[in-house]
Image (cartoon, rainbow, N blue to C red):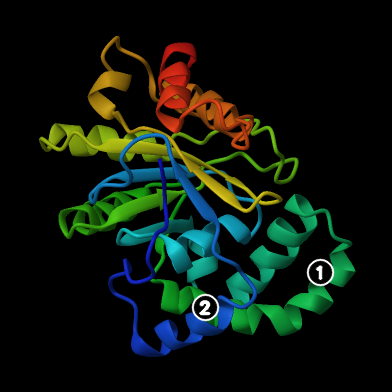
Amino acid sequence: MSKKPTDGGQKNRKLWFKAFKKLLVKRYKRPEFIYLGKGFTTGSIIVSNHEGTDAPLSLELYCDTPIRMWGASEMNSGLVPLYKYQTRVYYHQRKHWNLHLARLFCLLASPLTNLFYKGLNLISTYRDVRFRKTLKESIEALENGESIVVFPEDATNGYLPELEGFFPGFVMLAEVCARRGMDLPIYVTYFKKKELKYIVDQPIYYSELSRNGATRAEIADRLRHRCNALGKINTDKPKVSTEEIGEELLQKV
C-alpha cells in the first residue's frame, strides 16, 4: 500500500521556518512513500539511511507524523562548531571533498545550515555522559506524541548504498523507555534517492527485538541488515504487493 504523506505533521517549528521550508520543496521533490505496513504511528522510533541531506530533508518536508531528529551536537552548538564539523566530518570524511574546497564552501554554507538547524529543533547527541540529555529530551518528545528520527549508520567510509554499521544509541533509548513501560515501535526505512522512493517497513517492537536477550549491538545490527534489505527491494514489480514484501522480510531478517 502506497500513501501520499501530507505536509503538516511537524510540531515545534516556528513560523519563519515553516515559510523557509516552502522554498525547499522546489529543490527537494516529494518522494513516494511506500509502506509495507499501515504507516507511521506517533511516539515511535524511525530509523533511516542518510543519503547526505536528502533523507533528512525528505522526512522533514513530507513526513505525515510529528518528528524530532537526532543530530550530532556539533550541528546544534553554534556556527563555529558547525563549520568545523561540516568541513572535516561531513564534506571531507563522508562526502570525500577536498578539505580546502570544503573549507571555502562552508564559509557560505555553514551560516545557512546553522539557521536551518535552529529551525529544525534538533535533539543533540553526544558520545559521553551528556547522552543522558539526549535520552531525556527524546523521552519528553515521545510523551508529547512526536516520533524520534535517527540516522545511525556508521559513515566512516562515506554514505554508501550498503550500510556498513549502525550505532546502537537508539536501541538504548528504546531500552530506557521499556523500563518506563513504553514498548516503542521501531520503523526501519530506506530512502532510494535515484528512484525518489522512501520505503517504510512494518514496525518492530522493542520487546520483540530484546526477547531472547539480544545485546544493543546485536539489535542494531539486525536492523541494519533489515535496512539494507529494504534498499534492495524492486518496487517496480507489479506482481507482488507491499504486504507480501513485508511478510517476506519478516521471515528473512
Left or right of 142: which side holds 242? right
Please name whichever residue, 30 or 84, is drawn nearer the observer in this view of the structure: 30
Please name whichever residue, 186 or 102, is drawn nearer the observer in this view of the structure: 186
* Disc ID at residue 102: 1
Please name whichever residue, 46 or 26, is drawn nearer the observer in this view of the structure: 26
Left or right of 208: which side holds 123? right
First in sequence: mark 2 vs mark 1: 1
Left or right of 244: which side holds 191? right
Image quarter where the N terminus lies is top left
Check disc 2 and give the amino acid type.
Answer: Phe
List x then y, in percent, for residue 90.
Answer: 69, 59
Q: CA distance from mark 2 to mark 1?
A: 19 Å
Check disc 1 and give the amino acid type.
Answer: Ala
Residue that appears at 17% across and 60% down: 144
Asked if labels 1 and 2 touch by Cβ distance under 8 angstroms, the answer is no
Q: Can residue 78 be seen from the camera position used here? A: no
Question: Based on the displayed image, in which of its 4 quarters is residue 218 positioned?
Answer: top left
Q: Nearer the viewer, mark 2 or mark 1?
A: 2
Mark 1 element type: helix
In the rendered image, which residue does mark 2 sit on?
116
